Amino acid sequence: MKQFFKFLFASCLGSALMLIVVTIVIISLIGSAVSNAASNTMKIKPKSVLYMDLSYDIPERTNKNDLGFNLELSLSNVNISNSDRAGMNDILNNIKAAATDPNISGIFIETSTMMTSTANIQEIREQLIEFRKSGKFVISYSDSYSQSAYYLATAGDKIYLTPSGMLDIHGMASQIMFYKHLFDKLDIEPQIIRGPNNKFKSAVEPYFLDKMSEANREQYEKLLGSVWGQITEDISVARNIDITKINEFADNLTLVFDDETAYNNNFVDGLLYRDQIIDELHKLTGSAADDDINLIFNQQYASSRPKTKTSSDKIAIVYASGSIIDGEGDESTIGSITLSKAIREAREDKNVKAIVMRVNSPGGSALASEVIRREVELASNAKPFIVSMGNYAASGGYWISADSDYIFADATTLTGSIGVFAMIPNLEGLFNDKIGITFDVVKTNENSDFGTVTQPLTPYQKEMLQQSVGKTYDKFTTLVADSRKLRKSFVDSIGQGRVWSGIDAKELGLVDEIGGIEEAIAYAADKANITDSYSIKEYPKTKSLYEELMLNSPYQEKYTKELMKTTLGETYPYLESIGKFSRLSGIYALMPFNFHIE
């Protein structure tokens, strides 16, 4: 007994010491976060320059817990330096505020590549063009430009390239990896049910085909042509270069390997080294040659920029970003419970006069989409409810948008994808024949084992699933027809899972107007008859650092994904798509793909 109490006391003492250590660590981390936030707040000096390096996957809004990303990586023994990862909300607001800030002389963009989608680039680009109307400068410089980075750079007054640098203009392509032969070798049967005539619903094609279907190839060609056409038109206008010439250079790759050709054909304004760029910034800011250029990062400026007047009248921005899932969501997923609550809170807030829902989603669970749609319907009956589509608002992303009062999309937004599918993989052959594992079952009813992956669906189960998918597709097309005032037969003809660009979606009546979130907010204010100032209130509420660290936030998964994307580079999307297969089970309204202009 004496020995027992000895071990018990030692155990309690160890637990107490561990609790003390953990508490000290948490207090230190929160203290560091507060210190970090304080260091980001600064007094903006005269002749400052807003500095933009946008070579990351830009989120819809800034993660206020700056410590979070670096903390997780440091805990994983990975040393990554701090980086400016402002969200779209702060990037756009910074550019707008800088236009009237007497301490900001101009904007300096130094981005060689961009990991975000074309629609995001387009919105930032349009805001930069608007900024130039203030008379302040926008210049871009890089050792080399990817296609996406160059597209952004064309919003500026001047574009500079390092001598011998590359300008990678080569057009657009999208490659799909197919797993049919792999599944054949492993005896995996992807049991797939698509909606009636959903020939364009190609999210599942890689699992049972070894190349694109003709329908899928047709929609890819249309999409790529539409997006590339918008990009070349914008470059042509900005740089006064004929579109035919842009495509000729894209065909022969001349600009990739010949910086002089880029300069001689007006793609860039000069071939300069860094010291020459610094001299140029001194001239533009009117600062002395021996003074340091005061560069302000996006996240620093966001916390320090001049504040707008507060108002009791508010416009709510509800962020709907990521795949749509049942239950709770986070910053990277749209949970039916989380987003529904956010919309409901905005609807019930008497100070909120209008709601703008920013949708950036390829879709997901059909059931979750319908749960969210109901809250959109209720909110739109109570006050103006406007949708702003970002990079994509397709399938389930369109489902949750349809009942809004008005829809904005960027020209290169990917939307539509009105279609559904279900998939339950059958792994019986893999387990039985390849691995040597067998299963047996005891059940109380005929279909108690429905949905298991260890045996194939029975004909009856497959028929019931087909009926359910058909009903879901019918509900989807009926929703779109009623909300958009279109014939149901027409919706079916442009549906069938087909993805459209924003510009094409407007022609088809799926979108009301081409524009970004700034235009959507202005429209909402007008519809709410807000003639004076108003303030913005964001939903869902972001988690505090404590909540991120302690309250079961999916931090590890989130940043493990970030680490894998950084480490694996271009191979990550292929491995991710294999992972998605293992998680697909049920009825989905999900877009088949996404692409950008790298």
Image: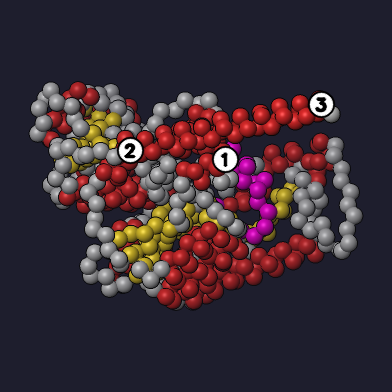
Q: Amino acid at mark 1?
A: Glu
Query: Badges 3 and 1: C-beta atoms under 8 Å apart?
Result: no
- Where does residue 520 sit, x and y in percent of width and height? 33, 62
Give me the disc on residue 195.
none
Mark with earlier residue (2, 1)? 2
**Crowd tier of the residue under label 3, counting other residues whose Cα lies within 10 Å: few below 14, some 14–19, many 20 or above:** few
Mark pair 3, 1: CA separation: 45 Å
The number of numbered discs placed on residues in the rendered structure image is 3
Mark with earlier residue (3, 2)? 3
Q: Quadrant of residue 525?
A: bottom left
Left or right of 134 in this view: 382? right
Vertical comparison of 548 with 295: above or below? below
Q: Amino acid at mark 3?
A: Lys
Mark pair 2, 1: CA separation: 28 Å
- Where does residue 272 sit, x and y in percent of width and height? 20, 26
Please tell me whether mark 3 or mark 2 is closer to you in this view. 3
Residue 558 seen in render: no
Query: Badges 3 and 2: C-beta atoms under 8 Å apart?
Result: no
Give me the disc on residue 2.
3
- What is the span of residues highlighted in magenta in the rendered image? 572-592
**Crowd tier of the residue under label 2, counting other residues whose Cα lies within 10 Å: few below 14, some 14–19, many 20 or above:** few
Mark with earlier residue (3, 1)? 3
Secondary structure of the residue carrying tag 1 is: helix
Secondary structure of the residue carrying tag 3 is: helix
In the picture of the structure, the residue carrying the numbered disc 1 is 557
Left or right of 117 in this view: 102? left
Q: Amino acid at mark 2?
A: Ala
Please tell me whether mark 2 or mark 1 is closer to you in this view. 2
Secondary structure of the residue carrying tag 2 is: helix
* Colour approach in the figure: secondary structure
In the picture of the structure, the residue carrying the numbered disc 2 is 38
